[in-house]
Image: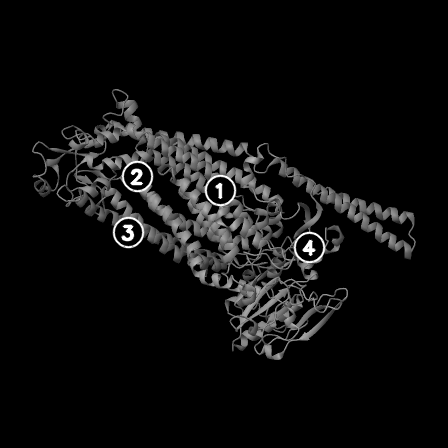
Amino acid sequence: MKRIARKAKDETLIELKSSTDSHTGDGPAVLTAFRINLHSDENSGNGVSSSERGALPGHTDADRLQPTTDTVFFRDGVRRIDFVLSYVDDKDGDKKQERREFEANLEKAGLELETEDKSDSKDQKTYFLKIHAPWDVLATYAEVLKIKVPFKTSDISHGQDMPLEWVSHPFRLPEHIMHPQPDYFTYHFDKSKINFFLISDKDTFFPPSTRNRIVFYILTRCPYYKENQKDKDKTGIKRLLSNGTYTAAFPLHDCRYWKRARNAECESERYNLYKHWARFLCFYKEQPLNLIRKYYGEKIGIYFAWLGFYTEMLFFAAIMGFICFTYGLLSYDDNISSKEICNASIGGSIVMCPLCDGKCTFWKLSSTCLSSWQSHLFDNEGTVFFAIFMGIWVTLFLELWKRRQARLEYEWDLVDFEEEQQQLQIRPEFEIRCTKRRLNKITQEMEPYLPISSKGARFCLSGATVIFWISLIVACVIGVIAYRLAVYVNFASIIKNPEKKIQLVGRFITPQLATSVTASCINFVIIMILNFFYEKVAVWITDMEIPKTHLEYENTLTRKMFLFQFVNYYSSCFYVAFFKGKFVGYPGNYSKMFGRWRNEECDPGGCLIELTTQLVIVMVGKQLWGNIQEALLPLMRNLWSSRKGRQHPETHYSRWEQDHVLQNFSQLGLFYEYLEMVIQFGFITLFVASFPLAPFLALLNNILEIRVDAWKFTTQFRRPVASKARNIGAWQEILNAVAILSVVTNAFIMAFTSDMIPRMVYLYAYSDKASMTGYINNSLSIYNISEMPNPNMLMEHENWLDNSTTTCRYRDYRYPPGHEKEYTHTMQFWHILAAKLAFIIIMEHVVFVVKFFVAWMIPDIPSDVKARIKRERYLIQEYLHNYEVEQLKMQLSASYITEPVSEMSLSTEMSLSTDKLEVLSECP
C-alpha cells in the first residue's frame, strides 16, 4: 500500500518495508515512515519525535528509536491518528477479502493507513489499523458537510462584569477551561476561498472532533466490494462491525485522563475534563461546556448543558418543596383531625366497619393515629400553593431553557444546521436497504426512497407491536391490583384484629400502607423486567421502519420508548391517585373486582399518603438502580484493570490499546441518559402535589448524575464520534406535553386524592364555629351491623363488641339507617363534588393563564443573540464581497501583464462583479 510521509526542511524520510514475518495474517504490507533529523546531536536523541513508539522485542533498529507508543500520531510523529480499526486474525477467507477491499477503497478515498501488527499488541492477536485524513480529504469533506470554520475574530464582547462577581467566584472554573478557544465569526468551508479563512496551520485547523467526524462519515459510506461487483449491501463500517470483520472502530482519546500527554502538540483536553469536571469534588463547580463541545461534539455538549440547567432550576423547586414540608412539620400540633383520631374518647370510641369480607374484624379508628399524622406532612394547605408553584416553575424552566438553547445554538454555530444538514444526515442503512430511486424535486438528483406500500406495512407492524407491549403493561398493572386486593384481606385480618399479638407493629403499619409498600416493590421489579425486554424490541421495530435520517431515527425511537416508559412507570401512580378508594360502595353493597375482591379503601386520612409511598418507592428505586448500573458496576469491573494499568500504562499498552479495552459508547448512549432524566421530570411534575420533597431528591440525584456521567465519558468510554445537534430533539416536545399534563394531574390530585377540599367545605359550610372540630365524625357515615349480609361475622365478634354497639362507621357521605334516603349520598357529598370540580377548573385556568403569560413575556431568543446573528450575517456578506473584489482585481492584474486590458472591459467586469455581490448582500 502506498503511504504518504510529510516532507520537512533538513529532514530525510527513510522508508522501510515492514517485515513479511510481522504480517503473517491478512494485515497488508506497510511502509513505515520514520523521521530522522540529520543535524541533531548523535547522543542527544532529539532527532526522534517523542510521540514515536518504544523498542519492543522483534522490532528493527529503526523501531527502537521510538520511546513510547502512548501517542496519537503515526510512527513518523507528524500525521495524526484520526480513527482506529481493530480486528483479529482468523481463518475466514471472506472476512480477509472484505478487509482488503475495504482498506483499498479507503486509500482510494484519500485516507492514509498504518497497521500495527498483532505481535505488538498485549494480547498477541489483535491488529490495529490507524487512519489519518490528510488536508485534501478534510477540505473536500468539510465542504461537503458544510462545516463552519472561522474567518474573523469576534468583535462582540461576552458581557460586562457583574457587581457581585466575587460571590460566584468559588463556583467558576479557570478561563482557559471555560473558553478553550477564541470566539470567531464562522462561515461554511469552501476550498475555492481558502484564503478567506483564518488558516494558520493546516494540521491543526480542523480540531480532532471534526476530523474524526469526517473520517467516520467516509467509513460509513465506503464499500468493500470489487469494482466489477455492485453489491450495495457491502457498504460501511457498521456492517463490517456487525459481521465480525472488524471488532471495533473508534477515535482516540488525546491522553490518559489522570496525566497530561507528553507530546506538546496534544491538547490534553481529556485530562482537563477529568480534573475540572469529572471528579465528584467538583460538584459545586460550573460545567466547562465549551470544552465538552470541543472534545465530544455538540450533541453531547447540548445534553450536559440541558442536564446542568435542569439541575440549576431544580434548586428553586427543591427549596419551595422543603418549605412546604417544613410547614407540615411546624403545623403538626395544629392538626385537629389527627388529634380527634388519636383521642381515646373520640377515635377510640368509633368502631369502623370491617375492611374486607370474611376474615376482617371490626376495628377502632384510633388505630390509624400514626398514619393520620404522616398524611398531614404532605396533605396540608401548603401543598396547594406548592402544586400551583410547580405549574409555574415548569413553564419557567422550559421557556428559560429555550433562551439558553438559542444562545448555545449561536455560540456553537448551529443556527442553520438542521435545515442544511437534513439531506447530509441520510442513514447509510436507508441508502443500502432502499434500492428504488426517484428524482428529488429540490436537488434534481436521484435519491433512494421507501415505497408507500412498504412503509405502511412496516408502520402497521410497528404499531401492533407497541400496542401489544402496552397491553402487556396494563395486564401487569391489573395483576398487581389483584395482588393488592387479595393480600389486603390478609393484612387487614391480621393487623386490625385485636386478638392478634402484633399491636406494636399495628401502631405503625396500616393494612393500606402494608399493601401499598409490598405492591409498590413488586411493581418496581416488574417495571425493570419489562424495560429490559422492551428496549430491545423498540430498537428492533425502529430499525424495521428504516427511518431516512439520523434525526428521524432518534425521534421515532424516542416517542416509542417514552410512550412505553410512561405507561410502565406511571400507571401504578395513576391507579393510586385516581382510582383507588373512588369506587368502593358501602357495607352490604360493596363494589368488587372480578366479582371476588372488594375494591380498596383509603385510610380515613385519605389516599395521598399511599400515593406518596408509591411515588417514593418507584422514583427512588429507579434512581438508585440507575446509579448502581452507571457507577458501581463499571467501577468494580474496571477496578483491577485500572489499578494494574495506571502505574506505567505507556510501557504496557499503546494509546490505541488503552482505548480499545474501554467500553464502546453506542449511538443510543445519550438516548438512555435523556430517557432517565425525562422520566424523573415526570415524577417531579405529574405527582409532585403528593410529595413536595421529590424535587429535593431529584436535585441530589442530578448532582451525582452529572459527575457520574462525566466520569463515565472521560474514564470508562472510548471517545465517541463527534456529532452535531442544535437542540434536544423530540425530548423538547415530550417535556412540553408532560408540563401541560402535570397541571391537570396535580389539580385532580388536590381535588380527589387529597382530603383538602372536603376539609375546606366542612370548615366554611358545615362547621358551627368555623373550626375543624368534629370533622372526623362528619366525614364518617353510619351502618347498621344487624344488616350485614354475613351473619356469621356478627356472631364471631360478639365477644369483642360491646353489647351497646349496634352500628359501625365507614368513610363516605351517606344517609344513616332509618332515614328515608338511607345509604344514598347526602347533599354534602354533592357540595364537595361541586367544590372539587370548581377547584380543578379554577386551578387549571389560573396556572394555564400564568403559563401562557410567562411564555409570552419571555422571548425564545435573547435580544443580544439576535443582534449577534445579524452582525455575523452582515460581516459574512461584507467580507465575501471584499474578498471577491480583491480576487477579481488580482486576476485582472495577472491577465493585464500577459495581455493589456482596456479600461472599458475592466470597468465592465468590475461592474458585473459588483452587481453580483450586491445581490448576495441582499440575501437575508
Q: Residue at x 73, y 53 (%)?
A: 200
**Whole-percent x and y of residue 367?**
20, 37
Is 859 positioned to the left or the right of 616 in the image?
right
Q: Callout 3, which amino acid?
A: Gly
Asked if 240 appears above or below 202 in the picture, the reply is below
Is 908 positioned to the left or the right of 174 in the image?
right
The N terminus sits in image quarter: bottom right
Q: Nearer the viewer, mark 3 or mark 2?
A: 2
Residue under label 3? 479
Rounded to the nearest whole Å, what is the CA distance between mark 2 and mark 1?
28 Å
Q: Nearer the viewer, mark 4 or mark 3?
A: 4
Rounded to the nearest whole Å, what is the CA distance between mark 4 and mark 3?
62 Å
- Mark identifier at residue 310: 1
Question: Given contact means CB atoms under 8 Å apart, are the residues at marks 4 and 3 in contact?
Answer: no
Circle 3 crowding by C-alpha within 10 Å: few under 14, some 14–19, many from 20: few
Circle 4 crowding by C-alpha within 10 Å: few under 14, some 14–19, many from 20: some
Dot placed on the residue nearer the N-terminal end, 3 or 2:
3
Asked if 320 appears above or below 450 in the picture, the reply is above
Question: Given contact means CB atoms under 8 Å apart, are the residues at marks 3 and 2 in contact?
Answer: no
Q: Nearer the viewer, mark 1 or mark 3?
A: 1
Rounded to the nearest whole Å, what is the CA distance between mark 3 and mark 2?
22 Å
Question: Given contact means CB atoms under 8 Å apart, are the residues at marks 2 and 1 in contact?
Answer: no
**Nearest the camera: 830 or 22?**
22
Q: Callout 2, which amino acid?
A: Ile
Residue under label 4? 205
**Whole-percent x and y of residue 90?**
52, 76
Rounded to the nearest whole Å, what is the CA distance between mark 1 and mark 3?
36 Å
Per the image, label 3 sits on a secondary structure element best described as: helix
Circle 2 crowding by C-alpha within 10 Å: few under 14, some 14–19, many from 20: many
Residue under label 2? 609
